[in-house]
Image: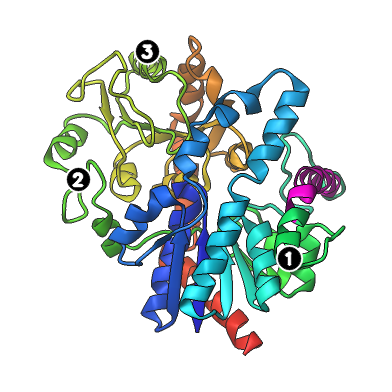
Amino acid sequence: MRHVMALVGSRGDVQPALAVALELRRRGHEVVTGVAPNLVPLAGRLGLDPVPLGIDSAALLGSDLVRRDMRSAHPVRRVRALRAVASAGWDELRTGLLALLDDVGGADTVVTGLLGQEVAAAVAERRGLAMAALHYCPVRANGVVSPVSGVRGPGATRAVWALGERVRWGLTRRAENAQRAELGLGGTRVHLPTRLRDAGAVEVQAYDPALAPGLADEWGSGRPLTGFLALDDDARARLGEAGAGSGGGLDAGLDGWLDDGEPPVYVGFGSMPVADPAALVAAVDAACADLGVRALVSAGWNDFSGAAGPGPDAKRVRVVGAVDHAAVLPRCRAAVHHGGAGTTAAALRAGLPAVVGWYSADQPMWGDLLRGAGVGVARRASTLTRPGVLAGALAEVLDDATAARAAALGARLVPADRAVAAAADALTRLSDDRA
């Protein structure tokens, strides 16, 4: 079987799918991997021979459109920005995916993540291919997990989802039908979730059923809950993260710092833009002083080189670049992060309680799910630099009872290798059913 993977977005959108690509290759399938141009080196280090596809996700996340216009107090400007971001890079994705399919002589399935599904589905429809998507959080209507904080009960939850789907369709309908016209397809008045269901697409739910009990029963085999996806140890070692040694461990400096005191609090926001790194480091340092803890701050995709505050060898706070979560988090006592699905999964696997400093999208949902499980709290990311906010949030999770609940939940999660295998099984069945 030949699978063409069209993976756009940030690292958190792409890396879990790369674990599935590696598993499919291990099974003898042919996998052609297209990723956002800025993530080509990442996929390349995994030996996947990636092709650049779509637009640079780091540039988009750092643009005025995302940093300024989407947060505008002016409602018209904000809606325009949301519409623009929702369809950003669709032309490039369409033309790139068509060229990729032509170059390899076709495929059996087109596999995408959440971002770019509209384009990938239209291309798959045009070429008569099976379609699959990997979802890292609940994004379809259901009565179990609400997309809005404070909503309770199946009826109210479904009503909120229905409203959200109408809003999303209103934002993307014009752009989606423009893509369909470019492909020679007719326009549609039916939103994507319904069309994918009717076409027999598989939407793999790549997160753990323990956080959404009852959802697997509601959705059935078309949307199987597999557990969180993650790279195995060999794949992580190939990435050679900053702070990681060539054997997949940590460099001597960071390893020694972690050993030289109590387990620290991890602070990292991945690909999310930190507006004021100096203010964040100062807030972390103040929280550590208040609570008597240490912190390891990961810059992620941000530039912390100009941030004032403690140096890299400080006893209380250490600032580093990107790190291997699987190597670092088990040596920490709590995590402060943005609530991306990948970081949420890594912290849960390490048995850590969390403070979710959310920005947008699915991040508030993960904050709610962790709070509901008794293993975390959530705050808007922009508030964490205000006096006392971070210290107060950490004080809520740095207790023995929360730590015990987090450790117990971490032990219940589907092991990553089983989750990856289940996702690969779902894609294989889809291909076999179409054969």
- N-terminal of the two: label 1 or label 2? 1
Disc 2 marks which residue?
250
* Residue found 83% across the figure and 61% down from its top: 187
Q: Position of residue 1 (x, y in %)?
A: 50, 84
Mark 1 and mark 3: Cα distance apart in space: 46 Å
Q: Position of residue 124 (x, y in %)?
A: 65, 71
Asked if the stretch drawn in magenta spans residue 173, the answer is yes
Task: Check whether the beta carbons of the residues at disc 1 and disc 2 lie within 8 A of each other.
Answer: no
- N-terminal of the two: label 3 or label 2? 2
State the colouring used for the structure image. Answer: rainbow
Q: Main secondary structure of the magenta part?
A: helix
Q: Is residue 238 left or right of residue 435?
A: left
Mark 3 and mark 2: Cα distance apart in space: 27 Å
* Residue found 29% across the figure and 41% down from its top: 331
Mark 3 belongs to which amino acid?
Ala
Q: Position of residue 354 (x, y in %)?
A: 48, 35
Q: Label 2 neighbourhood size at 10 Å, few (<14), some (14-19), many (20+)? A: many
- N-terminal of the two: label 1 or label 3? 1
Say the numbered circle drawn on residue 286: 3
Q: Is residue 116 left or right of residue 340?
A: right
Mark 2 belongs to which amino acid?
Leu
Q: Is residue 353 visible?
A: no
Q: Which residues are magenta?
A: 157-176
Q: Nearer the viewer, residue 2 or 351?
A: 2
Q: Is residue 61 above or below residue 431?
A: above
* Residue found 22% across the figure and 41% down from its top: 243
Disc 1 marks which residue?
219
Mark 1 belongs to which amino acid?
Trp
Quadrant in which the C terminus appears: bottom right
